[in-house]
Amino acid sequence: MKIEMPKLPYEFNALAPVISEQTMNFHYGKHLQNYVNTLANLVKDSDLEGKSVEEIVKQAPLGPIYNNAGQVLNHTLYFTQFKPASADNRPEGRLAQLIEEAFGSFDDFKQQFAQAAATLFGSGWAWLSQDEAGKLVITKEPNGDNPLRAGLNPLVGIDVWEHAYYLDFQNRRVDHIASLWDIIDWKAVEARLK
């Protein structure tokens, strides 16, 4: 992934009411754009210039470059994991099988993943990732951390920084998390499997 804004497979108003056009304007249009611009400026004329965002996340020392690269990667995966809402939105095929193997059922997975996102103290991300053996795991990552740094393959991320949900849900993080299940594009998530 290059240091650039991801192309969205939907319009800014397509995820409403889960994520409003106003939130998209701020979260994607301003927050993510700032991370992209800042990261591009920070790596200019450094040994990380020309590297992919994933390589920067894996290699950069903790600090401003790592923080901005993590947020570019996190937000790119986040915004490209969505589609307009649909009823009974569930994974199928290989992804559904891996979820059942790791968590017992899709409903059990949703409960565990939502719990991880709801109980993360402060700002950060809850992730469904794939380990090196191919098993699915849930992690909580503070601030802009990404599971890629720990050798995991990130599949689905829930952003629990307040700017992700405050305009639409105020301080109701749990309600926001519950609403996201309607807009996850499980085919896009399955395409991330290794």
Image: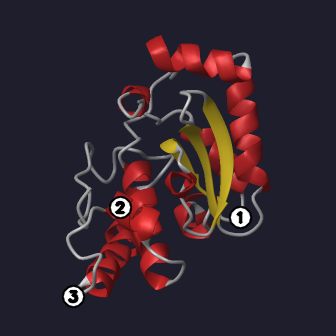
Which amino acid, mark 1? Asn
Instruction: Say which element carries label 1.
Output: loop
Nearest to viewer (mark 1 / mark 2): 2
| Residue toward you, 54 or 71 | 54
Q: Who is closer to the viewer here, 65 or 173?
A: 65
Determine which residue is flagged by label 2. 55
Amino acid type, residue under disc 3 in the picture: Asp
Q: Please give left or right for residue 24 compared with residue 101 in the image.
A: left
Res. 45 mark: 3
Q: Quadrant of residue 9?
A: top left
Task: Give the quarter of the image for residue 129.
Answer: top right
The residue at 45%/11% (across/down) is: 93
SS at badge 2: helix
Is residue 2 shown left or right of residue 19?
left
Per the image, the residue denoted by label 1 is 171
As drawn, 12 above or below 29: above
Instruction: Work out whether mark 1 precedes mark 2 in sequence or the reverse, and give the earlier one.
Output: 2
Q: Could you tell me which secondary element the residue under label 3 belongs to? A: loop
Q: Where does residue 47 sit, x and y in percent of width and height?
A: 28, 80
Label 2 or label 3, whichever comes before in sequence order: 3
User: On screen, 76 above or below 30?
Assistant: above
Residue type indicated by callout 2: Glu
Q: CA distance from mark 2 to mark 3?
A: 16 Å
Q: Residue shown at 49%/46% (left/top)?
A: 17
The quarter of the rendered structure image containing the C terminus is top left
Image location of residue 145, percent across then percent down: 56, 64
